[in-house]
């Protein structure tokens, strides 16, 4: 260790500063010792994990003994193994500093390596592959196209309650934001989903901070700005107990939706405002906004939205003990749901009959109450039948295959599922060659019956591919 380095270390103010000095010295020694090793080290810092295949894809023109270089790399002080996934990675702070230097000093090299990484991970089906693909795509490719993929994947995981995958996606993409490698649409999209995730996990301060950044970055897109503004209102209402601030943001979002003619979201926002007033025990104001939403739903011909709004109005009237008027609204609800005749309308229609059942009890009409309960049960039975048919028929499963399919999703997890039956099911679904290494391992099992861990893994992979029971 040189006297100059010792002097710098002595004057360093923090442990991180001293670690950075040692890192820089080691990196310079690596460059002096072997330029090819230095090159493969920098390439290894681009992804969050690597193996030989990944590094060969990033350095296709490296003219050196690759196996020897790789062995030197993984035994260096910069690298650690990841036992869970049997890959290696550059240690956290070393990776951060290597990427900073590469991005600031050789941006073209940085972007070239990121493009190659995006190409490599684009063919992967696992969530970790999709996340890594987006991470590289968002700095190395068309930002608008990358942002579309971000919204699509994040929305899918949010809608399917895949919050573990969504959290990993947000945390990894925030590296690009914190390193100031992305701005505008990409930064706004990442921050929006950070805020959405924080809302789901009830972290109000983090949600508001992220959403405010998103609003600033996406202010030129009126539709997205309206969505963000409404989400900020939701955070203020549900997590911050700030109804006045929430109402202000809902009204701002309402004006933005009006400006671009997004009637569906305008009606939805009116319903949200009505619900806010109802939660604050202001029934007259709630009914006023619900009525506006109902009229707009009717104007655009969205009967399901109109029915759900009428239900909300019936709930307000019931709480105000206006039982006869509430009944009239629920009767209109039933008329709308009967015309729709969809699984959702059957389910909500059943719940509306249950609300009517309570109203008949309040009005001391036991026969009508009994009839309403019977109709609720009939609709629930039809709902179950339609959902099971919907789940089964699109997959073209036989009765035996469908029984296996249901067994995989049974709770508690079953351990009596035939491995042979599972193989037949995967073949019927056309997934035997598409489900990745995890299912290939399951298929290769020689046991007669599936182990619980394998069943859980299989269930997770099926859901990720879009196959699941309706309830």
Image (cartoon, helix red, strand yellow):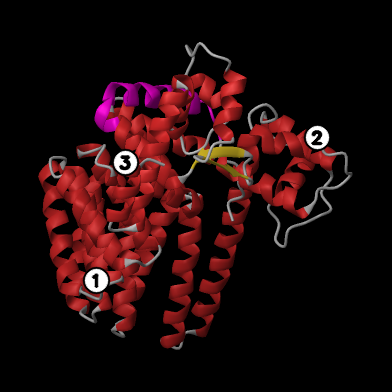
How far across and down, in percent of the image, does residue 229 sit?
19, 55
Distance from Cα at disc 3 to Cα at disc 2: 40 Å
Identify the secondary structure beneath mark 2.
loop
For the point 76% across and 39% down, the residue is 442
Task: State which mark lies toward you, 2 or 1.
Answer: 2
Q: Quadrant of the C terminus?
A: bottom right
Task: State which mark lies toward you, 1 or 3.
Answer: 3
How far across and down, in percent of the image, does residue 363 sit?
41, 86
Regarding residue 289, the answer to whether it shows in the image is: yes
For the point 61% across and 28% down, the residue is 71
- Does residue 41 appear left or right of residue 244 in this picture? right
**Residue extent of the magenta highlight:** 103-125
In this rendering, is residue 72 above or below 400? above
Graded by Cα atoms within 10 Å as few (under 14), some (14 to 19) or many (20 or more), the crowding at tag 1 reads many
Residue annotated with mark 2: 444
Mark closer to the chain start, 1 or 3: 3
Distance from Cα at disc 1 to Cα at disc 3: 37 Å
Residue annotated with mark 3: 176
Could you say which disc has been placed on residue 276 in the image? 1
Q: Quadrant of the N terminus?
A: top left
- Does residue 120 appear left or right of residue 254 in this picture? right
In this rendering, is residue 331 above or below 356? above
């Amino acid at each position: 260790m040189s006297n100059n380095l010792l002097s710098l270390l002595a004057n360093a103010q923090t442990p991180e500063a001293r670690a950075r000095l040692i890192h820089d010295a080691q990196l310079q020694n690596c460059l002096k010792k072997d330029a090819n090793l230095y090159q493969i080290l920098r390439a290894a810092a681009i992804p969050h994990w690597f193996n030989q295949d990944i590094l060969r894809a990033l350095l296709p023109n490296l003219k050196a003994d690759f196996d020897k270089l790789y062995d030197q790399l993984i035994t260096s002080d910069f690298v650690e193994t990841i036992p869970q996934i049997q890959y290696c990675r550059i240690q956290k702070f070393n990776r951060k500093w290597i990427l900073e230097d590469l991005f600031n000093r050789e941006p073209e090299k940085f972007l070239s390596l990121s493009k190659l990484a995006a190409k490599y991970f684009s063919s992967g089906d696992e969530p970790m592959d999709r996340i890594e693909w987006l991470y590289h795509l968002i700095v190395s490719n068309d930002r608008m196209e990358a942002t579309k993929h971000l919204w699509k994947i994040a929305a899918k995981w949010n809608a399917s309650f895949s919050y573990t995958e969504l959290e990993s996606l947000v945390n990894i993409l925030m590296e690009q934001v914190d390193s100031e490698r992305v701005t505008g649409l990409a930064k706004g999209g990442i921050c929006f989903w950070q805020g959405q995730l924080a809302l789901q996990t009830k972290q109000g301060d983090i949600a508001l901070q992220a959403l405010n950044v998103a609003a600033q970055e996406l202010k030129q897109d009126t539709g997205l700005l309206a969505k963000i503004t409404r989400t900020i209102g939701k955070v203020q209402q549900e997590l911050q107990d700030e109804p006045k601030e929430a109402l202000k943001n809902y009204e701002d979002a309402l004006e933005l939706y009006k400006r671009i003619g997004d009637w569906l979201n305008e009606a939805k926002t009116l319903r949200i405002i009505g619900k806010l007033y109802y939660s604050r025990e202001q029934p007259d104001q709630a009914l006023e906004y619900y009525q506006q939403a109902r009229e707009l739903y009717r104007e655009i011909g969205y009967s399901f939205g109109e029915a759900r709004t009428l239900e909300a109005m019936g709930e307000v009237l019931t709480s105000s003990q206006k039982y006869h008027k509430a009944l009239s609204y629920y009767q209109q609800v039933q008329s709308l749901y009967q015309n729709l005749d969809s699984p959702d309308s059957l389910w909500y229609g059943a719940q509306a009959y249950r609300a009517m059942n309570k109203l008949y009890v309040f009005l001391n009409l036991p026969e009508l109450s009994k009839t309403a309960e019977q109709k609720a049960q009939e609709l629930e039975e039809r709902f179950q039948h339609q959902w099971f048919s919907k789940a089964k028929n699109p997959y073209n499963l036989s009765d035996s295959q469908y029984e296996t399919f249901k067994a995989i999703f049974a709770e508690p997890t079953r351990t009596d599922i035939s491995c042979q039956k599972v193989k037949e099911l995967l073949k019927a679904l056309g997934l035997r060659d598409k489900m990745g290494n995890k299912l290939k391992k399951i298929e290769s099992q020689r046991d007669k019956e599936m182990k619980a861990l394998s069943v859980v893994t299989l269930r997770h992979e099926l859901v990720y591919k879009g196959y699941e029971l309706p309830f």
